[in-house]
Amino acid sequence: MRRVYIAITVLLFALILILPFSSIVMSVFQKGVGPFFEAIKRPEALHAFKVSLIIVLFVVVLNTVIGVWLSLEITRGTWKSKWVRPIINVIIDLPFSVSPVIGGLMIILLFGPNTILGTFFENAGIKITYALPGMIMATVFVTFPLMIREIVPVLTELGISSEEASATLGAGQIRTFFQVTWPSICWSVYNGLVLTIARSVGEFGAVLVVSGNIINQTQTATTLVYQDSVDNNVIAANSVALLLGLFSVAVLLFLEWMKRRKEDKIHAH
């Protein structure tokens, strides 16, 4: 039965991942490498890659800062009562249970042009929806739990004894964090970063709703694939999709390399 289970797993893996990816590769290069480079060198493609990169950079910084701070508050904070912690956990895990499209719609309902907040920000010269800020907010919403769920278990297992000892020796909070806490959670933060990057690059639903998918303005790489598919530009859509797929594979390989490096360091000690 073990061999049967392994065979079924391999078969499903081939049907779900390998065959579709192989189909994309064959579709892209059926007329040579020229159409592939033409597709990814288009002005709209270059602009879409640029927008995706900007979103990833902002989301990584925001998720790292907010994720580390909130993880410390969840595990070390003394202000919360017993009934507050479950509510915080529900809010953090909300993006896991809510469709990204709903997340994008919520941003429009809060910051749309006809809303109070949307009007306020537009009068201040800041456009949220159908612009880059709204796309960043939508991506942050989708990726928000990834960093926290990597750090919180480590902080919980670590406990506070080392940090209390550091404080007893006269170290301040900042020094204690960088010399005691950070070395223990750094690998979790790195894992959260990699997962955040992969999820940010591949996000589609929330960004499509918030951005309006305006060519050369608010179009990302994933929404460009969608637009090319709608326009029946199959080779262009598959070319961009192939580039995104290769990037995702590279990110996952990097994550695996980080895990092995972490294990090697643990065994070395």
Image (spheres, helix red, strand yellow):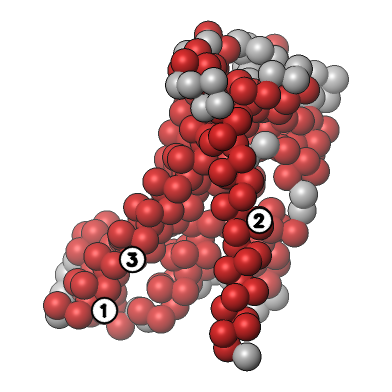
Residue 181 visible, this angle: no
Location of residue 126 by image quarter? top right
User: Marks 1/2: CA distance?
Assistant: 46 Å
In the depicted structure, whether residue 187 falls above or below residue 204: below
Name the spot of residue 243 as percent of width and height, x first.
49, 32
Q: Residue furthest front?
A: 31
User: Marks 2/3: CA distance?
Assistant: 25 Å
- The residue tagged 3 is 259
Of residue 18 and residue 43, the one placed in the foreground of this image is 18
Of residue 136 and residue 174, the one placed in the foreground of this image is 136
First of labels 1, 2 by sequence position: 2
- The residue tagged 1 is 162
Tag shown at residue 215: none
First of labels 3, 1 by sequence position: 1
Q: Secondary structure at mark 1?
A: helix
Q: Quadrant of the N terminus?
A: bottom right
Q: Secondary structure at mark 2?
A: helix
First of labels 2, 3 by sequence position: 2
| Horizontal side, residue 126 vs residue 38: left or right | right
| Nearer mark to the viewer, of 3 and 1 | 3
Amino acid at dot 1: Ser
Q: Quadrant of the C terminus?
A: bottom left
Amino acid at dot 2: Ile
Identity of the residue drawn at 83% across and 25% down: 115
Identity of the residue drawn at 44% across and 71% down: 76
- The residue tagged 2 is 16
Name the spot of residue 50 as percent of width and height, x first.
48, 21
